[in-house]
Image (cartoon, helix red, strand yellow):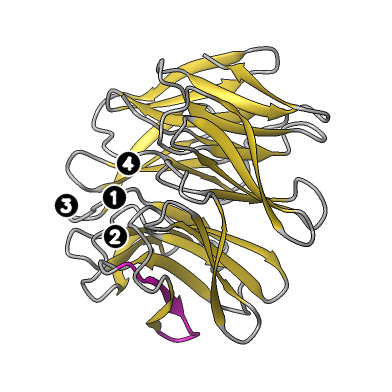
């Protein structure tokens, strides 16, 4: 049984897609305008959780995943049907690929950690896909922990990851080459996947679960990297803590599943970080994936239940409530 769900909006007007893996199949549960619909998009060979992304081309969605042969695959919408192609990886892919668009015009990258402990990009150069090693120095064997982001500074791209000894690193493009730099963690990152938010000018936050099972933040304050404990306080059971911005002005929310199988939000009130229990009670300790923009004033946090279905803990404008999707 797979234990996470990943959502994406903006594929088409009024549509939301929740992607997940079931029995090695690629599955999409989407809102068709009146009801949730459950479709198998690709059958067999899916080894990792799916990583969907839009924006590469108008009206197109790409879903990247690792195959049983440890290669990178892309399932994309052509405008009339779904197609799948093997892109690269050469049997070395250790975890879920993490796609990114916008680094350069007409380019899309899928970053991943190799079984050899290095960081790679499988990217479209305008005519074909190619693999490049970009960093890692053989020290990244937490294969789910690669998270790219652009916009930190002009022309810069950072790929954040956790080293084998519990430090947080960035492999970044400095304008002409890739470089590795240790930014935080200090031996306390427990190997759970990272998540990144770029929510204020000249600021970037890298969220991670500590060995103390709390929510941590390694962030750039304008001149240096700083580590802080934000919340959770020993109760974080999910593999990943998942941030989202834009719910309200000057607010950032970080979602996670507790050891008690409830869904929590560690959020910035404007002056401090605060924990709130939202719902759940039967959420598995995988990932919770938030999404805004489905409708005005609404936020959904999607998660897998112990019964095997997908549930949304939803803010309807006045309260949080759980809604079974399937």
User: Is residue 10 among the parts visible in the rendering?
Assistant: no
Classify residue 169 by image quadrant: bottom left
Q: Is residue 123 magenta?
A: no
Q: Which mark identifies residue 91? A: 3
Label 2 belongs to which residue?
A: 113
* Labels 4, 3: front one: 3
Q: Which residues are magenta?
A: 166-177
| Classed neighbour count for the residue bearing mark 4: other residues with Cα under 10 Å, few (<14), some (14–19), many (≥20) | few
Q: Is residue 305 above or below residue 164?
A: above
**Comes first in the chain, label 4 or label 1:** 4
Label 1 belongs to which residue?
A: 95
Label 4 belongs to which residue?
A: 85
Residue 176, given in percent of the width and then of the height, sits at 45, 86
Q: Is residue 155 above or below residue 81?
A: below
* Labels 3, 2: front one: 2
Q: Residue at x 36, y 51 (%)?
A: 97
| Classed neighbour count for the residue bearing mark 1: other residues with Cα under 10 Å, few (<14), some (14–19), many (≥20) | many
Measured in 3D between alpha carbons, the distance from the residue under mark 4 to the one under mark 1, in whole angstroms, is: 18 Å
């Amino acid at each position: 049984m797979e234990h996470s769900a990943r959502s994406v909006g903006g594929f088409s007007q009024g549509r939301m897609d929740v992607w997940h893996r079931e029995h090695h199949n690629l599955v999409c549960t989407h809102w068709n305008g009146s009801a949730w619909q459950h479709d198998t998009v690709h059958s067999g060979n899916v080894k990792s959780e799916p990583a969907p992304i839009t924006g590469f081309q108008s009206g197109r969605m790409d879903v990247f995943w690792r195959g049983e042969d440890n290669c990178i695959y892309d399932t994309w919408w052509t405008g009339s049907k779904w197609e799948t192609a093997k892109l690269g990886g050469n049997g070395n892919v250790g975890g879920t690929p993490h796609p990114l668009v916008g680094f350069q015009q007409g380019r899309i990258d899928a970053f991943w950690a190799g079984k050899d402990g290095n960081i790679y990009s499988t990217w479209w150069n305008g005519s074909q896909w190619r693999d490049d090693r970009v960093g890692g120095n053989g020290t990244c064997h937490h294969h789910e922990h690669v998270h790219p982001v652009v916009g930190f500074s002009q022309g810069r791209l950072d790929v954040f990851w956790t080293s084998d000894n519990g430090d947080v690193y960035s492999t970044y493009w400095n304008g002409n080459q890739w470089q590795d730099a240790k930014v935080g963690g200090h031996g306390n990152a427990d190997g759970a996947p990272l998540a990144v938010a770029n929510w204020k000018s000249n600021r970037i936050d890298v969220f991670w679960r500590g060995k103390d099972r709390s929510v941590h933040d390694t962030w750039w304050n304008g001149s240096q990297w700083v580590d802080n404990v934000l919340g959770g306080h020993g109760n974080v059971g999910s593999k990943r803590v998942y941030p989202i911005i834009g719910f309200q002005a000057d607010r950032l929310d970080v979602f996670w599943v507790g050891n008690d199988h409830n869904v929590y939000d560690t959020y910035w009130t404007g002056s401090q970080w605060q924990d709130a229990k939202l719902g759940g009670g039967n959420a598995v300790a995988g990932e919770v994936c938030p999404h805004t923009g489905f409708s005005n004033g609404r936020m959904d946090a999607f998660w897998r239940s112990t019964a095997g279905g997908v549930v949304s803990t939803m803010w309807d404008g006045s309260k949080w409530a759980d809604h079974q999707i399937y």
